[in-house]
Amino acid sequence: MDAKILTQGFGFATYPSVKLMGKKKNKKGEYKFGFLKELLFGDYIKPIKHKDSGKIIKKTVKGKDYIRVRTRGKFGYVLPGQIQPNRVMEINFVDIGQGDGCHIVTPEDEHYIIDAGKSDNMFRFLTWRFNLRYGDISPPKFTAIITHCDEDHYGGFTKLFTHQKKFKQLLKFEEILHNGIIEESGTSYSTLGTIVIDSDGDDYVTDLCRTDASCKKRIANAKNPGRYISLLKKATSSVKSLKYGDAPIYNKNGTKMEVLGPVVQKIKNKDALPILTKNKGKTKNGHSVILKLTIGNLRLLLGGDLNSASEEYLFKCFTNTDIKKLKKEINNPKTKKTDVKKASDKIQQAILKLRKGFEVDIAKSCHHGSPDFTNEFMQAVNPIATIISSGDEESHSHPRPETLGAIGKFGRGNRPLIFSTELARSAKEFMDTTNLSTYKKKERLVTVYGMINVRTDGDQTIIAQKLEKPRSSNNWDINKLVWNKDKNRYEYIK
């Protein structure tokens, strides 16, 4: 066993997974040494020492030397070579229902919550994860990132920011980061901030809340404060905005979290964002915080609720190309064939240019699998795997069939991967709830089924979802991505 594991007293499961072994009752009622649980790459493992000798407890079975450990709430045995000393990057796409909710743990054990859905699913996940009700160990401090002010992205933070009197442990947030737009209630886009008009007659929203002081001023002066402002009033930590050009949120030991959006412009000497299609919802969605994570060789994109209008805006900002105008020219029957070819070539050049900054290996599907996207942006992102966060009881039929088709068509490789929190949760038609409280029933559905788990050290990556029914030797569906040094790219291996 690695000396570092002995020194620090814990380690982590090796790639791609580890079988936890132990005594298990068979059909005859006999206890036999066998498979208990499958541990994912990076799962915490603590070797157990003998209380008298202080030495790690060992067990030899069929010529193999195992060590006793505690992991994921169970005691069992693993082989010494199945524990590594270093933590990996952990990205949990929590099944928060209709909306987005992502929990990120860096290799340095720093924690980020990027959106939290609308209901209390994220809260129940964190309660389970950190044993907030009864645990003796305080949870880590978190950074909250609210990609934009749609309730299915921010509503779940209400419970996270609220003191739970009956809980032994409390959640603490060091900072809240957002896209700069603090909306008031109402349907007009004027409720997003002060509207200014540029020399071309286009509308822009200003009063973007960059600092904690400007956020507090906006909140205090709000004439029609809605739910978003009510949420921010609950927060005790500072509130700041993000924009393209900021320094990385996180940048340590080969792991980086960069901000690719929103892209702010200067209009009449003020920071401003364009009003998209004269629509409030399209504007606040389209200017979501866009995050690009780089972990070694792996790249991952989180784009909130980007839409076709905002993607066209991003093309203008990053490639100086008006793809909407070019597509209109191509589709005009009066356009000459030579001009159609020129316009098509310009679009392809723009896609390749945008790809330099936006191409990733794993992408969260923007807006829960909505059809409001451009094929060109999807081609630029060009992921091997796409993860969709969506839920039941919504009137949009997310993820849309045309979106699933486009993801497959424009994804990288012969068989691009598509994951869905909603589909992954379709695990059990019935559940034995004899010994589970109502809270525990809900908690189990969130934490066991539905969540899409990404684990990576930068060279080796898994994307895992819980099997609907466990097999005799594993209980996860694990998809492996491996860095190919010769081809200088990630590849999916079966």
Image (cartoon, rainbow, N blue to C red):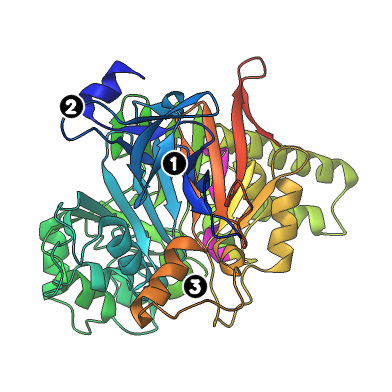
**Residue toward you, 105 or 488:** 105
Q: Residues within 10 Å of mark 2 (few under 14, many from 20)?
A: few
**Residue toward you, 87 or 243:** 87
Residue at x 79% of width, y 52% of height: 330
Which amino acid is tagged 1?
Lys
Numbered disc in front, either 1 or 2: 2
For mark 1, give the secondary structure.
strand
Q: Horizontal and vertical percent for residue 31?
A: 50, 51
Q: Quadrant of residue 491?
A: top right
How far is mark 3 from mark 2, CA to CA?
53 Å
Which amino acid is tagged 3?
Gln
Q: Earlier in the sequence, mark 3 or mark 2?
A: 2
For mark 2, give the secondary structure.
loop
Residue position for label 1: 292
> Does the magenta-highlighted stretch encompass residue 306?
no
How far is mark 3 from mark 1, CA to CA?
23 Å
**Residue toward you, 16 or 321:** 16
Q: Is residue 238 above or below residue 218?
A: above
Which amino acid is tagged 2?
Ser
Residue position for label 2: 53
Q: Quadrant of the N terminus?
A: top left
Residue position for label 3: 98
Q: Earlier in the sequence, mark 3 or mark 1?
A: 3
Boundaries of the magenta span:
358-368
> Does the magenta-highlighted stretch encompass residue 359?
yes
